[in-house]
């Protein structure tokens, strides 16, 4: 059963990883996105995330359900609110019988989440405020 969460609470990476462990899975792949200081020449001070929760949660379910229907387990947590440098912003994990599926599905989930799920990033940099994904 998948675990999906969008919350202002900090992301507890170890606890989320534990949700993926099960004797039937031989491959667990996780991705953790953190707030980085530099994007090229742009220096980030902090980021504020916001979400349209009902739609975002529905979209996460649409992403997770078909993967779980193939026998895998999906864990996704995205943080909202104010995040400082190095704070965890997103956790995506997939447990599958085989590593190739876990890698493929984890990459698909993070790429699709960033594109399709209504979560917005307001990045406050040293020179400007930028909205992006």
Image (cartoon, grey):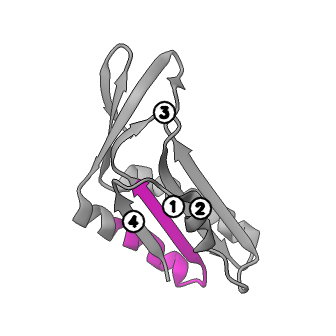
Q: Compared to 113, does 122 lie above or below?
A: above
The answer for how far apart the CA atoms under marks 4 and 2 are is: 16 Å
Say which residue label 4 marks.
5
Judge depth for marks 3 and 4 and give the one in front: 3
- Which element is circle 2 on? helix
- Residue 77, percent from left and from top: 45, 61
Start and end of the magenta stretch? 59-78
Q: Residues within 10 Å of mark 4 (few under 14, many from 20)?
A: some
In the picture, measured across the screen, residue 90 lies left or right of residue 129, that is right
Q: Earlier in the sequence, mark 3 or mark 4?
A: 4
Label at residue 46: none
Say which residue label 1 marks.
109
Q: Determine the residue positioned at 53% across, 76% down.
A: 67
Q: Determine the residue positioned at 75% across, 69% down.
A: 99
Say which residue label 2 marks.
106
Q: Residues within 10 Å of mark 3 (few under 14, many from 20)?
A: some
The answer for how far apart the CA atoms under marks 1 and 4 are is: 14 Å
- Residue 46, percent from left and from top: 39, 30
Given contact means CB atoms under 8 Å apart, are the residues at marks 1 and 4 in contact? no
Q: Residues within 10 Å of mark 1 (few under 14, many from 20)?
A: many
Given contact means CB atoms under 8 Å apart, are the residues at marks 2 and 1 in contact? yes
- Residue 84, quarter of picture: top left
Judge depth for marks 1 and 4 and give the one in front: 4
Label at residue 85: 3
Q: Tell which of 31 and 19 is nearer to you.
A: 19
């Amino acid at each position: 059963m998948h675990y999906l969460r969008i919350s202002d609470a900090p992301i507890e990476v170890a606890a989320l990883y534990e949700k993926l462990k099960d004797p039937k899975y031989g491959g667990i792949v996780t991705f953790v996105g953190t707030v980085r200081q530099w994007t090229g020449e742009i220096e980030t001070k902090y980021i504020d995330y916001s979400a349209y929760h009902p739609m975002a949660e529905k979209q996460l379910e649409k992403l997770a359900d078909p993967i779980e229907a193939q026998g895998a387990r999906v864990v996704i947590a995205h943080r909202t609110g104010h995040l400082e440098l190095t704070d965890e912003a997103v956790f995506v994990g997939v447990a599958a019988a085989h590593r190739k599926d876990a890698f493929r599905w984890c990459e698909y989930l993070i790429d699709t989440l960033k594109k399709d799920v209504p979560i917005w990033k307001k990045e406050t940099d040293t020179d400007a405020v930028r909205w992006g994904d």
